[in-house]
Each structure stands twice: as C-alpha cells, then as structure tokens.
Image: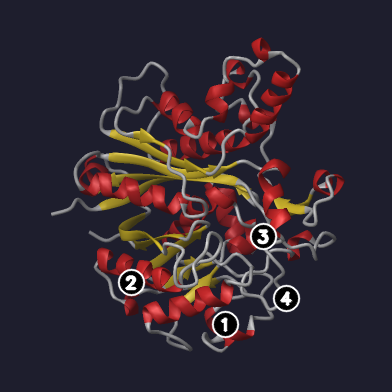
Amino acid sequence: MKNRVVITGLGVVAPNGVGVAKFTEALKNGTSGITFHQQLKDLNFSCQIGGIPNISEALQSKYFTDLQLRGFNSSGILYGCIAGIDAWKDAGFNINAESELDADTGLIFGTGTSGVEKFREAIYKLDEGNVRRLGSTVVLQTMTSGVSAYLSGMLGLGNQVTTNSSACSTGTEALLMGLERIQHGKAKRMLVGSCSDHGPYVWGGFDAMRVMTYKHNDSPKEGSRPMSATASGFVPGSGAGALVLESLDSALKRGATIYAEVLGGAVNSGGQRQGGTLTAPNPTAVQHCIVKAMENSGVVAHDIDVINGHLTATSKDGLEVENWTKALHRKGNEFPYINSTKSLVGHCLAAAGAIECVASVIQLKKQFIAPNINCEDILPEIAALVHFEKIPQQKIETTFNTIIKASFGFGDVNACVVFKKFTL
C-alpha cells in the first residue's frame, strides 16, 4: 500500500502577491501583476511588459543575513528561498541554524536557469581580467542546484536534496517526484517547488522567438490573455512557488493543518513526434499524460471538477483545450470549469508549475474558482468545444472536490497532478 500524501505548507512569490494571504486575495479579485518595464523598452524588446514580484530590501533581510546578501544577485534563488521558507513555516516548522539534521525531510526544487544576472556580472569581470574579484558565491548563485543548496542549508534537510529542470513543467514535475518519494516510504516530508529569475537576459530569447505579446505595452494588465481570440503571445513572468508534502500519518501525528491531498499524477514526453517539436506539444502524449494522471490517482474523468490549465495565451491554447476534451471525453456543458493563473501573473516559465499548483491548492482549500481575466472574447475554437460558463470571468464560490493541474514544456514534456479536498 502506498502512503497517502497531503499538503501541509504553502509558500508563494508571485507578481501579483508575495505570500499566501496576498496571493489568495489577488486570485479572488482577479488582480493582475503585469507591469511595464522601461528596461525592456530601452533594450528594444517587442514585449515591454512582464510580471516581477515586489521584494523590498526589508523583506529580503527577514530571510537572509547581511553576509548572505553581500554580492547576491540571483533573483530566482531569492524567490525560491522566500517561498520555500514560507512553506516550511506554514507547515508548522521552525528555522534554526543549530537544528539537528532532519533525515526524514528532503527537497526537490526546480529551475530553468539560475543566477543569470550573476553570471553576466561574472563574465564582465572575467573579460576585464578580474577573476579573483568574482567572489566566493558565484558558483552557488549560478549552478542549477543553487536554490536547493541554499534552502537545504537554511533548513537542515538530510533526505534527498536535488534540483530538477524540465522547462515549463519543472514545478509540477518536482511535486510529483516528491510525492513518489513519500508514497514509497523513502521520506516523511518533501519540500517541493520551482523558481525562475526575472529580466531581459532570461526573457530575451523568447522575445526573439516572437512568442511574447507586443500589443499591450501601453496596457500591461490587459496583456496576458489565455483563451482569448485577441491573444498575441504570452507575457513573461517570474517568481517561485513551494509546497510541503507530508505523509498523512506524519501530518496527523503532529496535528498539522492539511490543505489538500495529492492523489497522484503522471509525467511523460511526446518525443517530438506526431506534431510535437522542441516548442510544440505532441497532442497524443498530452492526452495520455492526463489519462495516466487520473488512473494513477484513482479517479475517472467525471470526478474532475476544475482544471487549472497550462494555457499560455499563444496559438496552442485551442489545441490544449481540445486535448482536455478528448482526454476527459467531456465537452460543452459537461466540461469542468477551467482557468489559467497566467492571466494574472503571466508565464513564469520554470516557476509556472509550482506557482500554479499553489494557486490550485488555494482554490480547493478556500472553495472558489479564480477568474480568467482578459478573455471576454473566447477563442472561437474553444467556444465551439466548451460552454462559456465553464470559463469564468468572475470568481465563483462553489463546492468542489478535485482539481487537476497540468504543465506542458519546451522539449515536448508534460506533467499532470490531481489534488483532492482532504477527508479522512
């Protein structure tokens, strides 16, 4: 028998809210975190808007020592550590630099690129022949596993500690990797999540690919338009999401607050076949991932009440919804409610899966469905498949039991997870 796994802690650093309380209010109110950035305009970006969390120096100092912040220039690690520590505290644990090693708790925290700004800073110093002035933390800030290394040291975690990286699927994949470890008794708790740096040196390649919107530089909050007929590309975002996964036995024994149960999920690849490419999904594999996630969770299609989709506001939104209808064999009025967190925060790249998993769990715990903003003009091919009431424009307060979250990433990789309202 596999161990049941529940969520006992949440942390989030998002463009529209830092911390679970602020993020929850932003979700309920449909508050966008997308803003204009002069730096992008100065660098001749077509897309000059993006989602960047608001982190003050005073807030940073609550998580890092002055010594840790000296020469620190890695926004992704900063976001990841804040979200991770918040989730750890939310689960009822303390931060103690002198604590005993916790062999029962591990960490899987993903990212796409790490410390891009720090790496750029180091390159300039190297080009000037100042190798000895790079500082002692360049490696930690620029290695992919930097975020997991920082977090593990802050918390004293002694089980598996690692970083995964699977493009936009990273955060959802990290959660499923942690889930399996607890299910099979290899850990009692796993802190999971993902993060992404912000700024032009992360976002520039996407601007060059012409996959980001250029039509809303003067109206940033209208720029992220998943499922909209007037969507013209995604809005880049950044931040981090974190969740504490715990065996049900452990959570009950210590009287922890339980947000939701993780029933199961699936990870696969489309192999860049059958229409799948480095940047586009193989629809057969996407549908298979959704079906296997349900099978592994012990649910059937009609058990799914809400979908939190990948839905980036690109030309593939219609294909994604079609894949959902085929995988679930449900359409029209029979289709579940569906929303996209990206309408509020943009596409946070490697952090997207984790931030959106946190959003999914919050909606399930608080029993509401967050609105899809900017899609009053639903894409015709989506409107032909799904009744418009299933794509809420305003917050809906309703009773529901399950929400399914999917992430589809560059490289034709997929991850899907099913969350359920917790009951003994």
- Residue 16 point in image, percent of width and height: 65, 52
In the rendered image, the vertical position of residue 377 relative to residue 223, given as above or below? below
For marks 3 and 4, give the CA distance.
Answer: 20 Å
For marks 3 and 2, give the CA distance.
Answer: 32 Å
Query: Left or right: where does residue 242 sit relative to residue 43?
Result: left
Amino acid type indicated by mark 4: Thr
Amino acid type indicated by mark 3: Thr
Q: Residue furthest left?
A: 1
Q: Secondary structure at mark 2?
A: helix
For marks 1 and 2, give the CA distance.
Answer: 20 Å
Q: What's the residue at 52%, 85% (across, down)?
A: 386
For marks 3 and 1, give the CA distance.
Answer: 24 Å
Query: Left or right: where does residue 265 sit relative to residue 232?
Result: left
Q: Nearer the viewer, residue 134 or 404?
A: 134
The residue that label 1 is drawn on is 382
The residue that label 3 is drawn on is 31
Looking at marks 1 and 4 on the same chain, the residue that comes earlier in the sequence is marked by: 4
Query: Left or right: where does residue 245 sit relative to residue 140?
Result: left
- Residue 233 point in image, percent of width and height: 69, 65
Looking at marks 3 and 4 on the same chain, the residue that comes earlier in the sequence is marked by: 3
Looking at marks 3 and 1 on the same chain, the residue that comes earlier in the sequence is marked by: 3
For marks 1 and 4, give the CA distance.
Answer: 13 Å
Looking at marks 1 and 2 on the same chain, the residue that comes earlier in the sequence is marked by: 2
Dot 2: few (<14), some (14–19), or many (≥20) neighbours within 10 Å?
many
Q: What's the residue at 31%, 19% (across, down)?
A: 100
Asked if one can make out residue 126 in the rendered structure from this viewpoint, the answer is yes
Please give the label number shown on residue 291: 2
The residue that label 4 is drawn on is 230
Dot 1: few (<14), some (14–19), or many (≥20) neighbours within 10 Å?
many
